[in-house]
Amino acid sequence: MKAIQFDNFGEPSVLKSVDIVKPEILPNEVLIKVSQIGVNYHETLQRQGNYPGPALSLPAILGSEVVGTVEELGIDINYIQVGSRVAVPLFAIQPTGGYAEYVKIPANFLVPIPDSISDEQALSTMLQGLVAYFLLKENSIQGKVVLVTAAAGGVGSLLVELAKIQGASKVIGIVGSDEKIEYLKTKGIDYGLNYKAKDWTQSLSEISDSSPIDLIFDSVGGDIAQTILQKLNTFGTFVSYGAASGVLPELNVNDINRFIFLSQTFKGFALFNSLNEISIKEGLTDLFKLIEEGKLKPTIDHIYQFDDMVNVHTLLEQNKTIGKVIVSI
């Protein structure tokens, strides 16, 4: 079968198309013929060897979420039909393996895709959708002013939409271009800020003075995290769930003093702590329902071809995507 593999850490060009053996399934597993692959920013860091945690063993095949059809059933599986269209959350059991024509997974992690939902919509609510879903499940936002960094990305744009659905009083989005601010207006954003603009910090101060920020969802870290941290309201919460800048948020003595005397909270979030076969099915079922009801409208950046994976990684690294990035195979 076809797969995209890399033998050395490095630039996007290390990604190569290879032919490898199709996976053999165990009695409790299902073989899936992949139709589309969700590509995520963290995979560029994995490819570089810069992703937090243990480095991948090489050679490696990236990819943690796909959709496709059931090709073969393990001998213990009798409740799924061959040909069924399913969401395949590989991220629940392993961080890699999805850039391939076929994948295998324990059958109990599969989630059927309703006929009314496209493969693209399903992919957009899997890994990134569940991150947004559980971030909001763990942090009440009713009536609060919420700030989201990387707000035009796959997770960020879903956070903006879901925050508005769940009753946030105002949502502020930080992005890297004026084009992305215009895009966020279609998602109901109240304030959009371009961090590349010279006066963006002044604009943020003006907004936070009139609408003190109660809750921050940050996936960028670095200087942006340090800047927005200063604008957090009394009793506010800062949630760090990534570091796309390559630098985790840094707290100094003054930050800690402010947390104490303003009764603020700094917390981390990692999706895998919220995942099990029940929570995945519940989360995706809820998100699929919002799509069916027309309340949630995930944005698809583009559908690329399998052989274009090098270009896809390049675009992600250059921050030139909006919404979900998908590769068809």
Image (tube, rainbow, N blue to C red):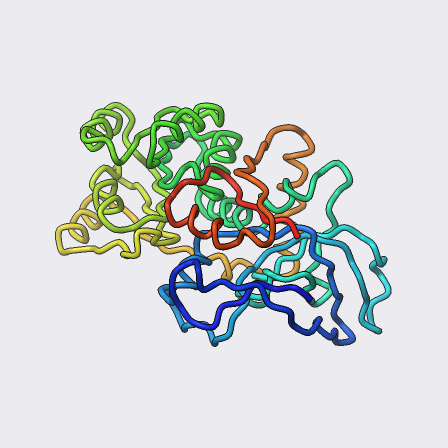
| Left or right: 269 as drawn, with respect to 89 | left
Name the outermost residue toward the left. Answer: 254
Height in image: 20 above or below 146? below
Question: How many numbered callouts?
Answer: 0
| Left or right: 297 as drawn, with respect to 314 | right
Q: Whole-percent x and y of residue 81?
A: 85, 57
At 65% from the left and 64% from the top, the residue drawn is 2
Q: Whole-percent x and y of residue 123?
A: 61, 47
Q: Which of the pair 179/312 is nearer the observer?
A: 312
At 76% from the left and 72% from the top, the residue drawn is 28
Quarter of the figure that contains the N terminus: bottom right
Quadrant of the rendered structure where residue 104 is? Answer: bottom right
| Left or right: 275 as drawn, with respect to 87 | left
Quadrant of the rendered structure where residue 303 is? Answer: top right
At 55% from the left and 39% from the top, the residue drawn is 302
At 32% from the left and 46% from the top, the residue drawn is 238
Q: Whole-percent x and y of residue 299?
A: 55, 35
Q: Whole-percent x and y of residue 41?
A: 44, 52
Height in image: 16 above or below 238? below
Q: Which of the pair 96/211 is nearer the observer?
A: 96
Height in image: 177 above or below 50? above
